[in-house]
Each structure stands twice: as C-alpha cells, then as structure tokens.
Amino acid sequence: MRRRSLLATAAATLAAGPFASGCSPSSSPSASAGSGSRRGRLTYGVWDVYQVPAMERAAREFERTRPGVTVDVQLTPNGTYWTKLRTACTGGVAPDVFWMNGPNFGLYAEAGQLLPLETEGSDAVLRPADFPPDLVSLYRWKGTQYGAPKDFDTVALWFNKEIFDRAKVDYPDSTWTWQTLINNAQRLTDRKRGIYGVGAPVRAQENYYNSIPQAGGWVLSEDKKRSGYSDEHTREGLQLWIDLIHRYRASPSLQQMADTDPTQMFQSGTLAMTYEASYNAATFYADPELRAKVDVAPMPKGRRRATVLHGLANVVYARTPHPELAREFVRFLGGERASLLQGKYGTAIPARNGTATPWAAGMPRFDLQVHLDALDYAVPYPTSANTAAWAHKEQMWLAKAWSGDDSLKGATGSLTDAMNQLLAQEREGRS
Amino acid sequence: MRETNREGRLWPAHILLSLGAVITVFPLLWEVLTSFKSFSESVQVPPTILPAHWDWSNYSKVFDGIPFAQQFMNTVVMALLRTAAQLLLCSMAAYAFARIRFPGRGAIFLGFLAVLMVPGQLFLLPQYQIMQDLGWLDSMQALVVPGMFSAFGTFLLRQFFMGLPEELEEAARLDGASPFTVFWRIALPLARPGLLALGILTFLWSWNDLMWPLIVNTDPAKMPLSAGLASLQGAHLTEYPVLMAGSLLATLPVIVVFVAMQRQFIQGIAFSGMKG
Amino acid sequence: MSLDVRTETAVPAQRSRPDARSQRELRRRERRFQHRDKWWGYALIAPAGLGLAVFYLWPVVQTLYYSFTEWGAFGGTTWIGLSNYRTLVGDPEFWHSLGNTGIYTGLVLLGIPLSMALAVLLNLKGLRGTGIYRTLYFLPVVTMPAAVAVVWRWLYNGDAGILNHALSLIGIDGVYWVSDPHTIRFAVAVVGVWMTVGYNMILLLAGLQSIPGDYYEAASLDGAGRVRQFFSITLPLLSPTLFFTTVLSVIQSLQVFDLVYLIIGANTQNALQNPAYSEGQTVVMLFFQKAFFDNQRGYGAAIVCVLFVLIMALTAVQFRLQKRWVHYA
C-alpha cells in the first residue's frame, strides 16, 4: 500500500510538474486517477478577517492528514472579494476552493465556474443528511450540488436589558407576537433621551426577509420565475416596518438609520431591540460592557414563526488544477472535526448537524440556543441566477416606500415589474 | 505693496489662515483622537471628544494584523519605482511633444490626453487580464508596471518644457548635438524643479493607491500598506479605531516627504508656468 | 516668462488689444525652436506611448467595443448594436446621476476662488509660518480616502455629529446631512473642496510666485491700488495656472467616485436604504454598480463611454474659451 502510494505520488508530481509552477490551469484526468495521496498547493479564498484564524487552523489540520499538501488561505476583504473573484474566474486563476454566498451562487453555477460535488457513494464530498436541507438546496443548481455548506446564520431579536428594566417592560420571549413587539417598542421609546424601541431598517436578511414569510408572503416563486412583491401577505410583512417608523414612531427614521447603522445604535445603547443575524453574537460578546447588558430572544410571531436561513458554502473552482485534492479539502472542511473547530472560534455557526453546540457554549451569557432552534422554522433564502440585479432594485424601491416617497403599493408594484423583467432576462440566458 | 509687508500688519492674514487651517485640520485631529479610543467608545452616541483613556492597542493591532514592515517596504519600493519610471518616461515623451516636430504629434498628444478623461475604475479589469497573461499576478511587477506610464505626468512636463528658454537648446543644436543629447544634457537639468513636482505627486498618489493592489495581489507579503489596511476590516464589522490608527501610520511617511520637499515642490510647479 | 509679458503687464491698459497681442504671439510661435529630426520624436515618445497604449488606451478601445455588446459576467459577448445606448437614453437613473455629477462639479469649482484666496494670503511678503500653513492645508490631500470618509460621516452624523452640535449652540436645528436628499450633494461637495483646496492652493501659489515683484512696484508707482493690482496684474498673470487647475478640477470632479461612494455608505451592505442615495449617486458610481454588482457590464461600458465623450467635449470647450480669458506669456 505504502509503495503504491509513493509511486502514485511520483506519477502525479511528474504529471503536474509543468503546470505546477505556472498559472495555467490543467483539468487533466490524470489528476483524478490516483486517490488519497496527492501532493500540491491548494489556495482557499475567504473574505472575513475575523474567520481567518479558524480557517488557518483547519488548513493546518488538513495538511497534517495529507503530507505533501499545503493550503494557502487567501484573504480578500469583502469590498473587493467579488470583483476580484469574478476577474480571476474569467482568467482561469481563481482559488481552488473558495467561499460562496447565496446571492452570488446562481451566477457562478449557471456560468459553469464551479465543480460539481458528489453527494452519494464512497466519493461523496458531502452527505446531504448531515446538513440542514435548506442550506444544501441553497447550493444546488439545476439538480447538481456545487457547494458544501460551511456555516449558517439565523435571525433573532436582540434586546438591551437595561432599557427594558428602566421602562419596566418584561423581556421578550417566545410568546411575543407582532402586536406585543409594537406595543412594547412604543413603551420603550423615549425620544427625549434619544432611545427607540426597535430598529426598522431596509435590511433584507435581518428584517424583511423574515417578516415576509412570517406574514405568509413570499419574495420569489419556487421556480424562480415570479416576484412575490405584489402578494398582499408580502406587503403586510413590509408594512410592519414602515408602521413602526411612521405610525407607531417606535423606530428611528430611515435617515437616522442611514447615518448610524441600527446595529451600532444597539451597541451604543440607544436602541432597545434589533433584529440581528447570528454572526453578530461574537461581536457583541467581545465587548465586556455590552455582554452584560444584552441578550437574545426568538423573533416575534406573525401569522406564523419564520426566520430566513442563509449560510456560506465552500465551493471548488471548475478549472482548478487539483480537483480531487480540492474536493477532499471541502469534504474535510464539512467534516465533524473541522466543523467543531470552526464553532469553537465563535464567529460563525458550523453548518454540520450536531456541531453547533460549542458555538453557543462559547458565549454562555447569551441565550444562543434561540439562534440554533430557529432552524426548525427556517425558510430558504431567495436566490436566482442573477440575484444581485434584482436585489438592487428591491432595496431601491423598498427604500422609497420606507421613506414615504412612494406608497407601499406603488413601490412594490414597480418592484414586481422590474424584478419579473430581470427574471425573464435570466431565463433567456442574459445575465 | 512691499512697504506694507511688515509682519505687524499681517495679523488679519494670520487670523484668516489660522481659521482655515483649524477647519482643515479638524477632521484629521478627529482621526487621531479616534485612533486612541476603544471600539465601543468610537461608536458611542453622543461621541466623546477626548478618549476616556488613551488606548495604544489599536496601533499594536495594526502591527499584529498585517506584516507592517514588509508592506511598508513594498509601498516604498512600489512608490519609488513608479516615480522613477514616470520621471524618465514622461520627461522623454514630454520633451518630444514640446520640442520635436513630427507628423502625427497633435493626434498622439490627444491620445495621451484622452487617458486623463477616463475614470480609473475602467482600467482595473483589462489591466488584470494583461497581468495574468504575463504571469505577473501577485508580484511586485504587477504593482509597479501599469503605474509607470502617466498621461498626467507627460502633460505636466510638456507644459514645463514649453516654458523653458529655448536659446541654450538652439545653440547646442547648432553645434550638432542630437535631439537626445540636447534633451538629456540641457533640457532635463533645467527641468529639475518640474521633475521634482511630478515626482512628489506621483509618490503621493502611488502611496495611497488602493484598488489596483487589492485586485492584482493576494499574498499579504506582496501588498502595499493601503491594501493591507483594507484587509483588516471584517465582513460585518469595521473597527474604526484600528482603521484610523493604520491610516495614520501609513500617512505619516508621506507627510514627512512633503514637509521636507515642499519648498522645492512649489518652485517646481511655479517654474512650469502651466501654459496651454 | 519672456520679455513681452513684462511690457504688457507693466502697462495693463494694453490688455484690451487682443489682436495685436495674438499676432505677436503667432510670430513668436513660428520662431519657436524645434528639432526637425522626426525619428527622434517617435523614439522618445515610444516608451511612454506604448505603455499608455497597452495599459490604458487599449482598455478604452475595448470598452468602446463592449459598449455595443451584451457582456457576460465571465466573458463572452454578443453584439447588440446600439441597444445599450438606447437603454441609457431612457434610463432616468443615468440622467439623474449625470445631474448629480454636474452639480458636484459646479460646487467643487467654487473651491478654486477659495484656494486662490489662500494662495494670495500665503504669498504676502514677510508672512511668517508659510511652511506650516502650506503643510496643514496640504494634509487632506495625502490622507487615505477610506479614513477621511469615515471621519466626515461622523462629523455629519445627524444625531451625534459635531456639526449639528455646533449648530445647536447657536440655536439652529441641524439635518441629517448625508442622508437627506436635499443636503447630500452639498455635504459631499464640501468634502470634495476640503480634499482639493490644498492641492489647488499649492498650484496657484506656485503660479503667484512666478509673477515678478517689479510689476507690482511699477503699478503702485502708477498709483494703482491693491484691488486694481489684483485685477490688472495678479489675475491675468495667474490665468494660465487658473486654467490648468480648472480643467483638471472639471475632469477629476466629473469622475468622482470613491469619496462619494464612501460618504454615502455605498460600501456597506444596506447602502440603498440611505434616502439620499439616488441624489448622491454619481455617474462613475452608477457605472461601478452596473459593471461590478449588477453584472450588466456592457451597459456599464456604455455609461463610461458617454461620460468620456462628455468630458472630452467639456475640455474642448474650455480650451476654446480660454482665448477669452487666459493670458499666455
């Protein structure tokens, strides 16, 4: 066995020799001939500086199990990550393995930039049963799996206990409904002191992507052909936020929130409640003062309970010179060991079932189980082949409804038209 | 005018200039103060003016987060090489435009000017493509080479050469010197102030160049400071005090360069006369 | 500076005879020393020219081509003729951003008189501390835009900003400067002026310093007051520098991107919730959005091409008009 693998290694090195030094991609089948004993240098593209330590650690562990393999973690800050990645993909020099998110996935999958990942048999890179189904399907395109879920985030209601105590309001719990939220947000608002009950910004993932399904509405039809913004229930899910600002006056104005991000207001103690995704937990926990003052509860119920579920995935670049090695790395990253490691570092909740507990346990003063339990009522994140194009229109039109420049009916009407047109273009293959 | 110029009568000028200077410097002072605040203090509402306690840790975070010394060196090398190349190449072209008559001169000059009129973001992707074709991604060449050529520099120096007295050059030419000799031996030494002005400007701009290094280089060891500092910002969180500390550290050397060279710099521009 | 300037400015009244002047200029130009070995011309231009052609002009030509295509996110183009341009003509977002950019440019140009005033003050003979002033005014030019934008966002903050705090002391209720559609363009232009005033001041100061002092002496002997000296000597002799700064300011302001982008918060995930976004968006921001985020690269190319033509045209007009007000030595 040992001799065989040595030979295989030598053969692979020879085969890869001329390519290894240059940048030219080789997808020669010879690379996949041998199994389990490949040498080479993998690059791993990520965008969050706070997750680099966890990713580096995972990379070192992988190297230990694969002698002769090195993994290079490449950080590109969020602002330029996508610009650079697209350019690199066009030129055939993207990292072998890189992070992907929901809104961008369709674009890359549709353009054939990603390598399919086996989900069955002994070669399986991931077994769908190991991950929340909505995360697995987020990275499936036309029946093929391209991404292995890396982490997930759910949304919950974060609140400032100090402000609640001062206003003598009971802390939020699972009995809260939209009406409870509205009533208490009004009670918590103290304009003289510059304190508001709840933030109602035009944020998709944290805000209206949750309230829309809570009201029984939808953003995008399952066949990704139609916009749901003309649905009455969808509009109800948006009206909640507009009313919190204008009718109940329990949220800062849109201008205030554009000046100071609601998360920042919450951190500085001028916002009693805010809808936040789980990735902010570690930020809140890092601040000792804030750690003592805030906690988290499930989002109030509308017609039903719902949270939008998003998560990143690890994907393999279609033109990687080391497809097998890259797949192995992705399999390793999704495995139990790497997942537990990721959770221990605290920034993101690992996607693999049963590995999330260390994440919650690492921040014992917060009731983080709320974020984990939210998986039970999660709805998939709406995406299509060119999500960015209509997401831009979405924010643009909804901001007009929020500010009062346009009626909600008018804005969502225009948005539906614009979105449907873009979706039609997608189907014609124009992206 | 000269007789009214005694220092005692200049106090209104001092008041106006100081007032303007305070307004100009205030945002930068804020930058300095913020760099000493803790993150939670930096986002506090209402903001504090002086830090509750002077926190140097933001500066050490910069040093911990990026290979500062290495990136500093990269920045110096990048800025110096770009500057040197521009001085040489731009002055050659500028001299030709100013003093040599050849068919197509106007059209070629127009081509140079056209480059000035295109937003820089446009060049990112095509230049990346070229770097990749050359196999130069993630290298010092990639940082330097596209920045070696400058339409602005050529334009500035052409104005400068046109403002130089012609007699010396004419005399040398009559003695049989080649145009290159005239350029190299006579015009270029006279153009020193102009070269200095262009040199300082190129140096400053290269120093702060951000987008291009971020796109073309990935390895932190091959990035300049500007790009390294940008990668300190998290996906969901910007640690403002660290950003401020880093940008101050990065800016300090160029301020020193400017202070040291400003007199010559201004003379340089003055000499060029800025003719059309 | 050649002799005829001296005679001209010593007798300012002669300035009103442009015909004689330009004829003399013409004759002088003919006399101008020029090499006639054209090959040297090409040889000297070649290195810079080839570099610019490869790295800058070629991309411009490519962009022109792409503006007539549907350009896929990962390459691959389809020729669609004028379709992008037709979309552009009917795109209110484009016209709006063009208007914003125009207003921004106009406002930033107001900074030139300010730079000029500073330069004149700094040029007063006998003034001490000019080196310090110069450095202080130049500081904004050298600081990193990313940090500058964050600081200005704080200063402008509607609830907690220093600006509104200062205004409240004199009984004025401030607004949300960078998220109010009515104020965003002014707020951004102020930062634009702040960032460029030092640069323009240095250029103008240099221009002022090249004006020989004896002109002023001659003029004051003739009994001309300070104000008249300014208009009859300083302004005309500074006009070439003023022209240069104006042309470059216009070109750069029309291309403004990162400053506005950062101040408006476009680098954050929820930039569009800023109610002032559409009033602040500039042409290059729109191009960036289309080309890098919406994956409409062909359309983005068309936007830049139109901007390019506009800048060319405006610059050409300025060169035409310079004959009316710029006085060359």
Image (cartoon, coloured by chain):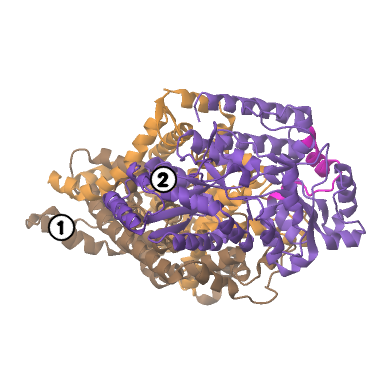
Chain colours: A purple, B brown, C orange
Q: Which amino acid is tagged 2?
A: Ala
Mark 2 neighbour class, 10 Å CA radius: few under 14, some 14 to 19, many 20 or more = many
| Left or right, residue A65 beside residue C161 | left
Task: Identify the residue position indicated by label 2 in the image.
Answer: A88
Q: Is residue B113 visible?
A: no
Foreground: B33 or A388? A388
Foreground: B121 or A36? A36
Mark 1 neighbour class, 10 Å CA radius: few under 14, some 14 to 19, many 20 or more = some
Res C281 label:
none
Point out the stretch of residues depicted in magenta.
A236-258
Percent x, y of residue B17: 56, 67
Is A240 included in the stretch rendered in magenta? yes
Quadrant in the picture for residue C222: bottom left
- Distance CA(mark 1)–CA(mark 2): 47 Å
Res B182 label:
1
Is A65 included in the stretch rendered in magenta? no
